[in-house]
Amino acid sequence: MGIKVALEHRTSYVFDRLVQVHPHEIRLRPAPHTRTPIEAYSLRIAPDDHFINWQQDAFGNFLARVVFPKRTRRLSITVGLIADLKSVNPFDFFIEEWAEHVGFVYPAALAADLEPYLKLVDESVPGSGPGELAQAWVANFTMAANTRIIDYLVTLNQALCSDVGYAVRLEPGVQSPDTTLAVGIGSCRDTAWLLVSILRQKGLAARFVSGYLVQLTSDIVEIDGPSGPVADFTDLHAWAEVYIPGAGWVGLDPTSGLLAGEGHIPLSATPHPSTSAAISGATDMCESTLDFSNTVTRVHEDPRVTLPYTASVWEAVTALGAEIDTRLDTAGVGLTMGGEPTFVSIDDQVAEEWTTAADGPQKRVRASDLSARLKALWAPTGLVQRSQGKWYPGEPLPRWQIGLHWRRDGKALWSDPDLLADPWAEDRQWSTPEGTDRALLLALAGDLGLPESQVRAVYEDPLSQLAASVRRPEGDPVAAADDPAPQEDSEDRRAELLARLDEQVTRPAAYLLPLHRGEDGGRWESADWTLRRGRIVLTQGSSPAGLRLPLDSVSWQPAPHPTEADPLGVTEELGAQRSGADAVVVHADGAPPTALVAEIRDGLLYLFLPPVQSLDDFVDLIARIEAAVTCPLVIEGYGPPPDPRLEVMSVTPDPGVIEVNVTPTGSFAEQSSQLQVLYEEARKARLTTESFDVDGTHTGTGGGNHITLGGRTPATSPLLRRPDLLVSLLTYWQHHPALSYLFSGRFVGTTSQAPRVDEGREEALYELEIAFAEIDRLTKAPDRDPSEHPAPWHVDRALRHLLTDITGNTHRAEFCIDKLYSPDSARGRLGLLELRGFEMPPHFQMAMVQSLLVRALVARFWEQPLRTPLIRHGANLHGRYLLPHFIIHDIAQVAAELRAHGIAFETSWLDPFTEFRFPRIGTAVFDGIEIELRGAIEPWRVLGEEATAGGAARYVDSSIERVQVRVIGADRSRYVVTCNGEPIPLLSTANPDVQVAGVRYRAWQPPSALHPSITVDDPLRFELIDTANALSRGGCTYHVSHPGGRSYDDPPVNAVAAEARRGRRFDATGYTTGRVDLSDLREKQARMSTDAVAPGILDLRRARTVGRR
């Protein structure tokens, strides 16, 4: 969490006369076994004239004995402490093998040590033993004998929490266990003492704990379950601890039913509540008034993904967004920004569909739910179409796509949402009457003025089935569905089987209506399909019938090539719907083989739309369909052509994620509102923007959040009107690697999804400078009319073969111009630039700060184009620029240059990104010298092809990781920092007191990796070596895996659990005793100084191999 709090607990007594205050014992100092780091502590007592002695009681708790020599009218005790609420996993402990299950018995020696904690709780007088109600509760609570002890304790604690209610009880003392059970309600100390009684009756050693409870309000409201307190809260609290061999004392809080975590700060733990009183003592006889208070204040908060900005900071961000929009509007830029946010499941982050696979059953359900929510908010009169989406090499069919379309002019595209069915709804129950598919097409034919004979039945292919049958092995099939078992065989069973096999031959699978717009665009036409076989027979497969039409059998003449509308053409207002003359029947020769196809699948009516060449035709066809349909249906098939008069949003599957292609927006405020709604509705659909590795590494979705830049229409795109804008952006990104790496995912480098233009190809920058000069020449040609925009294809032709990955793929580039002005199709001539180096931010405000940065750079370079040579970063690109220190310095320079240009972009607004991208691992201080470890970026390498069961595959080697070491306050001439005995080549920085380096190491050892025989570097031991004395002055240890040998099966459930797992792997201890061999150290430094590695990077693999030769 990265939150530090200041707690103040004040207790005061005002007496009605001068009294003698007898010695008091105060137990208000955090106990030695507290797991919450206490950074400061104070105990202030009034009157000031007193004597205090600190001691530890018989149970190891801190106790202050205070003596007051003078009489007084007032006694005040004020405790202050500062606690670092680092996440603690209460389940992170080891259990002895013999104690793993309920029913274990403590060994005799251990039982003797635990005797005070095993003594049964007396209900009344000493020796009376537990009361009847307590004994009955214990007898009634039973679990299986082989139950794991931790499961047993969790269940018992929750059972007691549900049986006893909570109440604030101001009376002194603790209720007896039977009293608490009898009334069914008690204070925290009552239920804690009851739990101690129950545990001891179960043969488990237990003790009573008093302490502070700190609860902080949640950053976000939970969608299921309680969200915690509405305000930050602290108070004195009580709970119990049970002794488990191996784990030690484990805290159980029966008030909440939870285990004790970082918010439980123990003050005193004893066998009996009477010896855990916070304050005990006496005064002379008098009347007194008690006053007390407990307050908690946050004193430090690291930026975090659940609350990246305070309200005042976010107000400043939105104000700058409005200011930049004004500058863009004044300059006539006409910029629009869209994106492709991605989401993963809240409930399941290990299934293939949420890790690697593009499709899956739950992914369809979640995507459908999200689409329905967004339609209700953004397009209540829009159309939901479930069509084919992207088609990737190696996949048999295009992926599905849920398209949401609505008219920009506000008119209805589809009026009745109840007529649109959701085939993937979790609670769907559809039953469409037989013949509805034919009736729909007959109604459409009548509306178009076509004869009923144009509605044709479509059948499955019996010849294909026969051909498949003759290729089967000899004998009867063995499948249970086709081969009745002897006990199930009968004449009726055989007749049923024959009827089912023959059904596809005699029963239509679907119906179609040939339809296309005439060449003159005046009216609809329907081709008269006459096939050689006498009826229309589908090709074999399980896809929708609309994708399996026998188009090659319609005519000997090739189908006419569709004419695409010019995306730069001027579009008129959408015309009236359902207008024009009646359709006519034409000969199939020379006509486009397109058709409407209706079929009933899984009880639902589906209508497959043919491709159309204009939005006017699409709107007209949709209006006719809605007028003809009488029951809910699913619209599938081809979507509308690109047109600025139609707003389009789609929800599609991608490996491991759901991708949402949002509509472009024209202002910062509009985009902010859009993304806020999208994030909130996705969460309601049980989708999230963050994921976690098993080791606790906190990342985004693993998918992208690609940002698209363009204009309202392709003709008004600023990137086509001013090609120098694209040149400036490319140049600036190349100058500042932080723009590529700070916002990226974990997979970076030459073979990543979005490599920089200077990654992997040495000649790219040389050629790119030529391309920039050529663009400049063409756009500033002396014979060009200054009032005209440059030819739109110039930029595409100049940059298409340079903005690619190393394989030449134009889509897999950081700056993707596939949709700028591609020669391939009209869908690629949209005037769009796609920035693909952005990963999905966990919070919408972080996404908007990304957007604000891009908008600010567009505004700057529109006003003042950038004309500077490109930089050859060399080894530093994957050296220092993958370390957080240099990335932060680089992005700070970007923010400073924006401020110098009159754009008040604050560097601190990027802190949430640096904390999220480069989490602090740990800090240690020795003799005033600080060593800090942070996560850094390590490029992943795609390996060569390897044979697999399914063919060939190229694995990604993610086994190498990198950490940054930052040293503050060390004399470079005297101190050396080592990692596993190897000197770290620290680099000087702009601050003479700060030195930085990176350490590459093998984190795990997969079978397919570079150098698979090199073992894991675990743990990493960092030491501060004092060369003047040849001694290690201290060290810290970073464990690549859990130091206790725990192997987690599942990733953490949230960011708090992930932080606890990460924190467990750092230990601020560990150093080499005795004298250090300085000659060996200097020899290693000498070899490293001449080695061919990036400056400031220690590669432990190389040190263990090349460095040993």
Image (cartoon, rainbow, N blue to C red):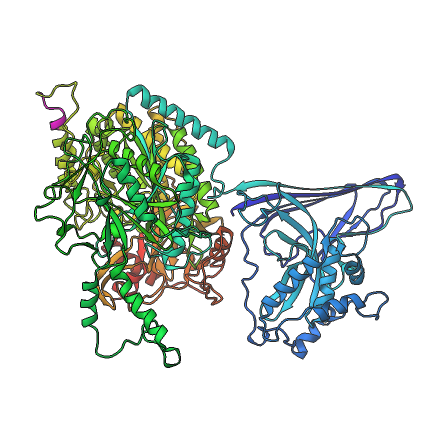
Residue sticking out furthest to the bottom:
486
For the point 11% across and 48% down, the residue is 555
For the point 41% across and 29% down, the residue is 669
Q: Is residue 911 visible?
A: no
Is 487 magenta? The answer is: no
Tell me where residue 639 sits by quadrant. Answer: top left
Question: Depth check: 26 or 456 in front?
Answer: 456
Residue 577: give x, y in percent of width and height: 30, 29
Residue 88: give x, y in percent of width and height: 55, 55
Residue 83: give x, y in percent of width and height: 59, 48
Q: Number of callouts in the render? A: 0
Tell me where residue 579 sits by quadrant. Answer: top left
In magenta, the rendered stretch is 777-782
Report the side of 560 relative to 595 (left or right): left
Question: Depth check: 999 or 987 in front?
Answer: 999
For the point 57% across and 40% down, the residue is 299
